[in-house]
Image (cartoon, rainbow, N blue to C red):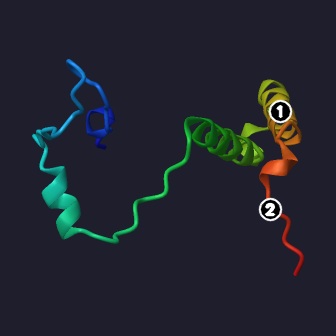
Amino acid sequence: MIGRGTRLCPNLLDGKDKEKFYIFDFCGNFDFFRLNKGKATKNQLSIQGSIFSLEFDIAFKLQDIAYQTDDLIAFRASLVESMVNKVRKLDKSNFAENNI
C-alpha cells in the first residue's frame, strides 16, 4: 500500500510544493503485482465471521447422539440462541434484495 507520502502537498516547506517522493520497496511488492496482474485475492472471513462459523460447526456436531448429555444439550441450546440473536441484530439494509 502506498500511503500519505505520495499525496500532493502544497506549501510543504518554505512555501514550496512537494516535487517528488521515494518509495522503498523492501518486500518486492511492485515486481510481484506487476507480474501477477488481475489475479483474484483469496476471500477471507472476518474474525466475527470465523467465530460464527466455528460456533455453527460446534452446534452442528453437538447434535450427535454421543453428545446428548444434560450439560452439552444446555450448552448447545445457549450457543444456538446466541447465534440466532446475532442474526436478528444484523442490519437488513446491508443486504441487496434479489427479486427473481
Q: Residue furthest front?
A: 15
Q: Is residue 2 left or right of residue 44?
A: left
Looking at the image, residue 10 lies above or below residue 52: above
Q: Nearer the viewer, residue 8 or 94?
A: 8
Q: Residue at x 56, y 36 (%)?
A: 47
**Which secondary structure lies at badge 2?**
loop
Q: Residue at x 77, y 30 (%)?
A: 72
Q: Which residue is tagged 1?
A: 73
Looking at the image, residue 84 lies above or below residue 36: above
Residue 79, position as x, y percentages in the image:
78, 32
Q: What's the residue type where badge 2 is placed? A: Ala
Q: Residue at x 83, y 32 (%)?
A: 73
Residue 8, position as x, y percentages in the image:
31, 38
**Crowd around label 2: few <14 · some 14–19 · many ≥20 (10 Å):** few
Q: Nearer the viewer, residue 91 or 1?
A: 1
Looking at the image, residue 12 lies above or below residue 98: above
Q: What's the residue type where badge 1 is placed? A: Ile
Q: Residue furthest top?
A: 14
Q: Residue at x 31, y 32 (%)?
A: 9
How far is disc 2 from disc 1 in space, using C-alphas?
A: 36 Å
The disc placed on residue 96 is: 2
